[in-house]
Image (cartoon, grey):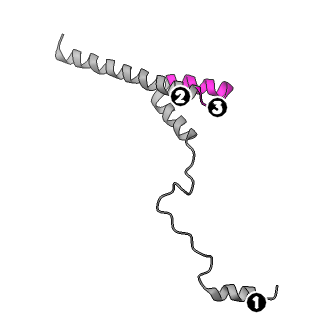
Amino acid sequence: MTKGIILRDLFITLTIIFYFVFTIRYFLTFKHNKIFAGKIKTFHLVMIWFIPFIWILILKSLIKSAPGSHKAKNKNPSKPFSDNNDDANRASNMGF
């Protein structure tokens, strides 16, 4: 056997092992997911095996919650609606 065949077989073997480990790990995680149910969950479980890497990234982005304001970076500190106290005084003296 030549060195090229050995490297090719090693690459294919490592790719297959990575495929199974990655897919089985996410498959087991998604199987216990409560967001999807019924036929949709079955569809996603099948697609995890057919298109593992792409479908898993799609599902992760669908399941991930949107960050709240406490997680946002570089947010501006809250400012009052009016920096001028005269506006507040005029509004309170309008007679309502």
Q: Which mark is residue 29?
A: 2
The percent position of residue 57, horizontal first and vertical second, equals 49, 36
Q: Secondary structure at mark 2?
A: helix
The percent position of residue 35, horizontal first and vertical second, equals 64, 34
Task: Give the prevailing secondary structure in the magenta stretch.
Answer: helix
Q: Is residue 41 magenta?
A: yes
CA gap, disc 2 and disc 1: 62 Å
Q: Residues within 10 Å of mark 2 (few under 14, many from 20)?
A: few
Of pointers 2 and 1, the one earlier in the residue sequence = 2
Q: Amino acid at mark 2?
A: Thr
Of pointers 3 and 2, the one earlier in the residue sequence = 2
Closer to viewer: mark 3 or mark 1: 1
Q: Is residue 72 above or below residue 1?
A: below
CA gap, disc 3 and disc 1: 57 Å
Q: Residues within 10 Å of mark 3 (few under 14, many from 20)?
A: some
Of pointers 3 and 1, the one earlier in the residue sequence = 3
Q: Secondary structure at mark 1?
A: loop
The percent position of residue 91, horizontal first and vertical second, equals 73, 85
Q: Which mark is residue 15?
A: none
Which residue shows up at 53% across the image and 24% down it?
28
Q: Is residue 11 above or below residue 83?
A: above
Which residue shows up at 74% across the image and 86% down it?
92
Range of residues picked out in magenta: 32-49
Q: The C terminus appears in which quarter of the rendering?
A: bottom right
The percent position of residue 7, horizontal first and vertical second, equals 23, 19
Which residue shows up at 64% across the image and 32% down it?
34
Question: Where does label 3 land, which residue?
Answer: 36
Q: Is residue 31 left or right of residue 88?
A: left
Q: Which mark is residue 93?
A: 1
Q: Amino acid at mark 1?
A: Asn
Closer to viewer: mark 3 or mark 2: 2
Q: Secondary structure at mark 3?
A: loop
